[in-house]
Image (tube, rainbow, N blue to C red):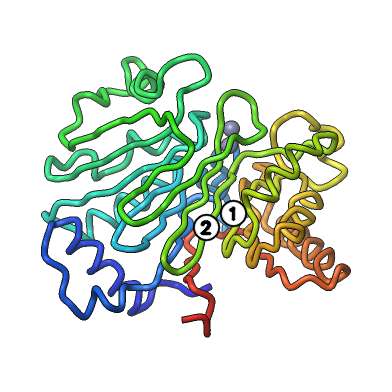
C-alpha cells in the first residue's frame, strides 16, 4: 500500500477531465490511470476517535474507488467528510461528478453525507445509488437524517445536484465500470458490490455474516467473489466473540479468511473493525489471519483496512 503518489495525481487529472466534460487527450485514452482504492473510513458501528485507534482509524465505512475515469464512493460513513475536503481542494470550482454506492442505510454507512462538502457546491453532480431501506424508500431514509431537529439543512435544500436512485436490478454500469450486487446476510436490506474495472475487480461487503449452516448461501457467495482482486469484507469478530454474536450480521475472521481462500481472492482487507478493538487488537487479528493462510499454503494476501491507505490495481507486474 502506498500513500498518494504521482500516479494518483494522474488519476485525479483524468477524473477531473471527465467530470468537466473535457475531451480526453488521446494518449490518456490509450493508457488510462491505474485503478486505485482509498480507505476513508474502516470502523464499524460508531466512530471511535482516540489514542488507541490512531493506526487503523476511527471513522466509519467509506471507500473511494477511482477507475476508468469514474469516481465511485462506497458508503457514506463518517470517513466521507474527509474525502469531501480532499475533493473540494482538488476540483475547486470545476464541476465534480461522482457516484455514491450505498450498501445499506445503517448510521455508520450514511452519517457522513450531511458533512460532505461537495453537496454544498452548486456545480457538483452526485448520483446516489442503493436499494430500498428496510422499511422506507431510500430517499425518505437519507433525507430523514437531515430533517429538523437532527440537522439544520435538509437534503432537498443543498445546492449540489443530488440524484437518489433506488436500484431495481442486481447488475448495472457506472460509466464503463460494470457493477454486480448481491444481498448480504445482515439485518434489514443490505448488499455487497463487485466492481469490474479494466484493472481487475473490487468487492465490498462491509456488513456481512457468513452463517455456518447455510451451505447454499455459502456457495453463492463463493461464486460471486471467485477470482476477486481486492475483497474488502466485514471481519469484525474473532471466533470467541462470534460465538456470543451469532446472528448479529457481522463476520467471523476465520470464516472470512476461509471464504476468501475458497473463492481464490487475491487480496483481502479486513473491514468494519469493532469499536471495542484497539490498534493492538486489530494487529493481532491480522497476524492470526495470515497464520490461517500460511497453514493452508494459500497465496491470499491479507491486510487490515487502514484509514488513509491507498491500494493500487493491478498488482505490480500485471500491467
Ligand atoms: Zn456497519
Ligand atoms: Zn449495518
**Is 295 situated left or right of 137 in this image?**
right
Position of residue 59 in the picture relative to residue 267 (left or right)? left
Disc on res. 130: none
Q: Are marks 2 and 1 in contact (CB under 8 Å)?
A: yes
Q: Position of residue 62 (x, y in %)?
A: 46, 47
Bin the neighbour count of mark 2 within 10 Å (Cα to Cα): few under 14, some 14-19, many 20 and up: many
Q: Residue 4's spot in the image, x, y percent? A: 39, 72
Q: For this rendering, which residue is in front, 130 or 207?
A: 130
The residues bearing labels 2 and 1 have C-alpha atoms spaced at a distance of: 8 Å
Q: Residue at x 36, y 43 (%)?
A: 100
- The picture places residue 318, in percent across and down from the top left corner, at 52, 81
Above or below, comparing residue 90 to residue 314 in the picture: above
Q: Is mark 2 within 8 Å of ligand 1?
A: no
Specify the label residue 232 is tagged with.
1
Q: Which residue is mark 2?
A: 202
Q: Residue at horizontal 77%, vertical 51%?
A: 253
- Disc 2 element: strand
Residue 304 position by quadrant = bottom right
Judge from the rendering whether residue 269 lies leftward or rightward of residue 217; answer left or right: left
Precedes in sequence: disc 2 or disc 1: 2
- Which quadrant of the structure image shows residue 281? bottom right
46 sits to left or right of 177 = right
Please name whichever residue, 24 or 39, is drawn nearer the observer in this view of the structure: 24
Q: Which residue is at a point 78% across and 67% down the rendered structure image?
A: 290
Q: Residues within 10 Å of mark 1 (few under 14, many from 20)?
A: many
Q: Relative to 317, is 248 above or below? A: above
Q: Which residue is drawn at the image coordinates 37% and 62% (left, top)?
A: 67
**SS at badge 1:** strand
Query: Which quarter holds ligand 2?
Result: top right
Placement of 26 over or under 202, stated as above or below: below
Toward the bottom, the furthest residue is 317
Q: Is residue 197 above or below residue 80?
A: below
Amino acid at each position: 500500500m502506498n500513500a498518494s503518489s504521482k500516479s494518483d495525481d494522474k488519476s485525479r487529472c483524468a477524473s477531473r477531465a471527465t467530470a468537466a466534460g473535457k475531451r480526453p487527450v488521446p494518449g490518456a485514452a490509450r493508457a488510462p490511470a491505474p485503478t486505485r482504492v482509498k480507505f476513508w473510513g474502516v470502523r464499524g458501528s460508531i466512530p471511535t476517535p482516540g489514542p488507541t485507534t490512531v493506526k487503523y482509524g476511527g471513522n466509519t465505512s467509506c471507500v473511494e474507488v477511482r477507475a476508468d475515469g469514474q469516481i465511485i464512493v462506497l458508503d457514506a460513513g463518517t470517513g466521507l467528510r474527509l474525502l469531501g475536503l480532499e475533493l473540494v481542494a482538488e476540483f475547486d470550482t470545476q464541476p465534480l461528478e461522482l457516484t455514491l454506492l450505498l450498501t445499506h442505510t445503517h448510521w455508520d454507512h450514511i452519517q457522513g453525507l450531511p458533512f460532505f462538502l461537495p453537496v454544498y457546491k452548486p456545480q457538483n453532480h452526485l448520483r446516489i445509488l442503493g436499494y430500498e431501506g428496510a422499511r422506507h424508500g431510500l430517499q425518505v431514509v437519507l433525507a430523514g437524517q437531515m430533517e429538523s431537529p437532527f440537522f439544520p439543512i435538509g437534503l432537498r435544500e443543498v445546492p449540489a445536484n443530488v440524484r437518489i436512485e433506488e436500484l431495481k436490478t442486481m447488475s448495472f454500469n457506472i460509466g464503463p465500470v460494470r457493477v454486480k450486487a448481491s444481498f448480504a446476510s445482515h439485518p434489514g436490506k443490505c448488499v455487497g458490490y463487485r466492481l469490474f474495472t479494466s484493472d481487475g475487480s473490487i468487492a465490498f461487503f462491509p456488513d456481512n455474516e457468513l452463517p455456518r449452516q447455510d451451505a447454499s448461501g455459502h456457495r453463492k457467495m463463493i461464486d460471486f467473489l471467485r477470482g476477486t482482486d481486492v475483497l474488502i469484507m466485514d471481519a469484525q469478530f474473532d471466533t470467541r466473540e462470534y460465538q456470543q454474536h451469532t446472528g448479529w450480521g457481522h463476520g467471523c475472521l476465520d470464516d472470512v479468511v476461509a471464504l476468501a481462500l475458497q473463492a481464490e481472492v487475491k487480496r483481502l482487507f479486513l473491514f468494519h473493525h469493532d469499536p471495542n478493538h484497539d490498534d493492538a487488537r486489530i494487529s493481532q487479528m491480522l497476524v492470526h489471519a495470515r497464520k490461517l493462510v500460511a497453514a493452508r499454503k494459500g497465496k491470499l494476501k491479507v491486510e487490515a483496512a487502514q484509514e488513509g491507505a491507498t491500494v493500487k490495481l493491478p498488482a505490480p507486474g500485471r500491467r
